[in-house]
Image: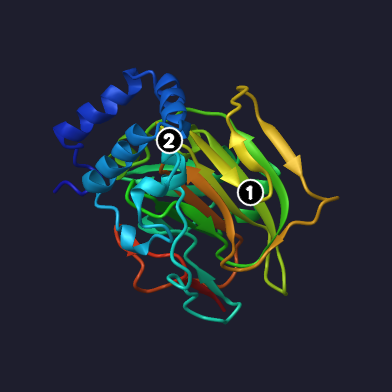
Amino acid sequence: MATEEDRPLPAGERWAVALQHLLPKQALTALAGAVAGARGGAATTALIRWFIARYGVDMAEAAQPDPARYATFNDFFTRALRPGLRLPASDDAAVLLSPVDGAISQLGAIAGDRIFQAKGHDYTTTALLGGDAALAAHFHGGHFATLYLSPKDYHRIHMPCAGRLLRMVHVPGALYSVNPATARGVPGLFARNERVVCVFDGVDGQPGPWVLVLVGATIVGSMATVWHGVVNPPRPGRVREWTYAEREVVLARGAEMGRFLLGSTVVLLFPRGPLAFNADWAPGRAIRVGETMARRA
């Protein structure tokens, strides 16, 4: 009997993935970035209203619910939430919080150095981290969570636990979609796409290092962090790295750390050690910033 992993992708998903191999993804992304950053007045407002209706965005959660008050589509897409809307589920520092609104793609143990993607696909920690085998070794046998942000979601990213920033690395790559169908159809997707790797050390006695990776995608115009601002563009086609030994950047659990200008995926890596994911968390489940993701023993 065929297993789920043995079954081929549905024809519609196969065609969607095949089309992505042919599309000029870099050009589409540059165009989308230009449109999203344009101050188009009534045209921008019309685009925002269409997007809200098309994707079912809940503007009642937004700090500014009036679409006409956003000067650019990017301002709307990275909108803030109403104060107090996403409160941490626990004050216990041993509890790791969901860093995003979105859905769980996959989570669990890292099998040696391999991270499960979907439907028989996996990729290595070294590939995800831009070829840094020394950094990747910290996560062999550790834990991961891959979290997908859909177009309707809140697109700011928060800290799952407190951390001291050690390094940030921009890794060039492809710009495939990161939706569930593409994750099932493109091998090594999250280690192939453009990404920003943020490496943190633990604080307050918590273990480290741990990593939060922002993964780019088709029409994701840029990614930004609170300490750097916009990381990409530019896209010089080579690995870029910033270190923070001489500039202390410490972020509290739950603090905003970055944002996507158009949607994508976050991958979290934690080192080997006692860590239990929330028993209610499973692939496909909707999640919200601040809810309990896992607990360190």
Please state which amino acid type lies under the numbered disc 1.
Cys
Residue picked out by circle 1 = 198
Residue 15, percent across and down?
21, 27
Gap between marks 2 and 1 measured at Cα: 17 Å
Instruction: Note whether residue 283 is visible.
Output: no
Residue picked out by circle 2 = 217
Q: Residue at x 61, y 77 (%)?
A: 93
Q: Nearer the N terminus, badge 2 or badge 1?
A: 1
Q: From this viewpoint, which residue is outermost toward the right?
A: 246
Rendered image quadrant of residue 256: bottom right
| Residue in the foreground of this view, choosing between 87 and 126 | 87
Q: Is residue 134 left or right of residue 38?
A: right
Q: Residue at x 22, y 44 (%)?
A: 54
Q: Residue at x 56, y 73 (%)?
A: 274
For label 1, count other residues whose C-alpha is less than 10 Å away and answer few (under 14), some (14-19) or many (20+).
many
Please state which amino acid type lies under the numbered disc 2.
Ala
Which secondary structure, mark 1? strand
Instruction: Note whether residue 72 is visible.
Output: yes
Residue 177, percent across and down?
36, 35
Rendered image quadrant of residue 86: bottom left
Which secondary structure, mark 2? loop
Q: Is residue 47 left or right of residue 190?
A: left
Residue 131, percent across and down?
63, 36
* Residue 47, label in figure: none
Residue 186, percent across and down?
35, 33
